Image: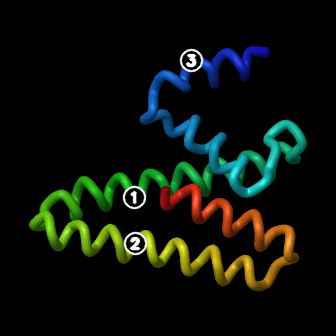
Amino acid sequence: MEQQATSQAEVTNPFSVELSFESYLQRVGLVAASMPADQLRETKRAFFGGYGDLLMTLEHDILLLPEDLAVEKIESMVNQVQDFWMAEASHASPELLSKAANAVNLALG
């Protein structure tokens, strides 16, 4: 019940990294409550690490570029993520392939 209250409070904050993590788990078909504690912790560490690195890249690199070049770099980064997930999905079952395609589509809007 406490986890639900936290999530509900975070819904009002579109910049919640915790809420983004929960959304990520849903997109890739994982349920935190059914994951072994070590798997959940390592998944969360990887997610927060990647998120933090992206924020550092935005703050220290992208924001310093002219707007047209910044947009080009962000589009390139989006394409790299999309390519990664499509390659990962090609090695997986059809069910996982469908989940990955849905995750990419949701992430890209």
Can you give x and y, in whole percent of width and height, for residue 53 in the image?
A: 41, 58
Label 3 residue SS: helix
CB of mark 2 within 8 Å of CB of mark 3?
no
Query: What residue is shown at x 85% (from left), y 37% (from top)?
Result: 33
Disc number lying in front (1 or 2): 2
Query: What residue is shown at x 54% (from left), y 74% (from top)?
Result: 82
Residue at which label 3 appears: 9
Q: Dot 2, crowdedness within 10 Å: few (<14), some or many (≥20)? A: few
Q: Is residue 80 left or right of residue 26?
A: left
CB of mark 1 within 8 Å of CB of mark 2?
yes
Query: What residue is shown at x 72% (from left), y 22% (from top)?
Result: 3
Residue at which label 1 appears: 54
Query: What residue is shown at x 43% (from left), y 51% (from top)?
Result: 52
The answer to which quarter of the image holds residue 79 is bottom left
Rendered image: mark on residue 77: 2
Who comes first in sequence, dot 1 or dot 2?
Answer: 1
Amino acid beneath label 2: Met
Most foreground residue, 5 or 39 = 5
Label 1 residue SS: helix
Who comes first in sequence, dot 1 or dot 3?
Answer: 3
Location of the N terminus by quadrant is: top right
Can you give x and y, in whole percent of width and height, for residue 44 in the image?
A: 65, 48
Q: Is residue 27 left or right of residue 93?
A: left
